[in-house]
Image (tube, rainbow, N blue to C red):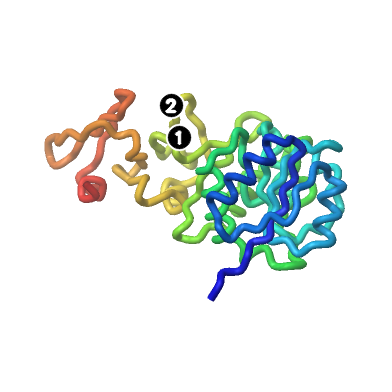
Amino acid sequence: MTASRIKILICEDEGPAQKHIVKLIRQVNKDAEIVAIVETGEEAIHEIENRHLDLIFMDIELADGPCFQTLQGTDINSPIIFTTAYDQYSLKAFELKSIDYLMKPISRADIEQAFAKFENMKRMFVKGTQVHFQNDLNEKKLQGHPDILEKLEAYLESNMHSQNAIQRLFIKTGETIEVVQTNDIQWIEASGNYIKIITEKKKYLLRSTLSGIYKKLDQEQFYQIHKSTILNISYVLKIEEMAYGDFNIILENGESLKMSRNYKDLIKSF
């Protein structure tokens, strides 16, 4: 049986960027059919209203302004993958049917991950169904809404199949939300009712349990090595056996973490 074509609309106002994303899409998914390429939000509305679309790749800043303004009130029945050079629009992207938020320059790996997410989540995007947060979820009204992160986390968790681990976390810092790629996380520590997330450049505090975050991560990349520690094995340099069956894990940056004898799954994986 021949696989059905994935009908794709590309909304991008820069010629080189159009060619680049078309090339990557065709390299990654042989079933992709690019039905139109538009440069403005008005053109996007016309295509959305007059075509059956499976997926939309949309630059946030189009020739006639930010797409959020132009598309306001438009009934969008297809999931959107946003492509942008700006990171300040990530919250607004959740008001529409966003399944990914790709930062330029976009790589083949970005497109591969986006299509993987599309395949795992497309059951949600049934024609006529709106998947969004409350209308007050936007950057201007971020302050005073302590439930924003809970909504984001609930959205990610409800859309995550067991074989599709999350690729990023949304972490509130001050009055903004930072997007942290899970590949950049070196390890995670329990800290009371919070968890401490350590990357090479920064440490973050997120309200969650260690077991709660562990279930969302790639189980082939992240291992629990202690009752209070989860480790990204991509950063392991060596493992030293200590007394009483415990181990000392040395990371590439010189940091040292203790692995309890009760958590030896990491050793078994080698």
Where residue 5 appears, as percent x and y from the top left, is: 63, 64
Q: Quadrant of residue 33?
A: bottom right
The amino acid marked with disc number 1 is Asp
Is 143 on the left or on the right of 107, as rendered?
Answer: right
For mark 1, what is the residue? 184
Residue 163 appearing in the image: yes
Where residue 140 appears, as percent x and y from the top left, is: 78, 35
For mark 2, what is the residue? 200
> CB under 8 Å between callouts 2 and 1?
yes
In what element is the residue under mark 2? loop
Which mark identifies residue 32? none
Q: Pick whichever, 53 or 125, lies toward us.
A: 53
Q: Quadrant of residue 191?
A: top left
Residue visible at 39% across and 36% down? 187
Is 45 on the left or on the right of 203, as rendered?
Answer: right
The amino acid marked with disc number 2 is Glu
Placement of 162 over or under 137, stated as above or below: below
Residue visible at 78% across and 57% down? 76
Q: Pick whichever, 139 or 114, lies toward us.
A: 114
Where residue 178 appears, as percent x and y from the top left, is: 60, 34
Residue 171 appearing in the image: no
In what element is the residue under mark 1? helix
What's the distance in space between the residues labelled 2 and 1, CA to CA?
A: 7 Å
Q: Number of callouts in the render? A: 2
Q: Quadrant of residue 17?
A: top right
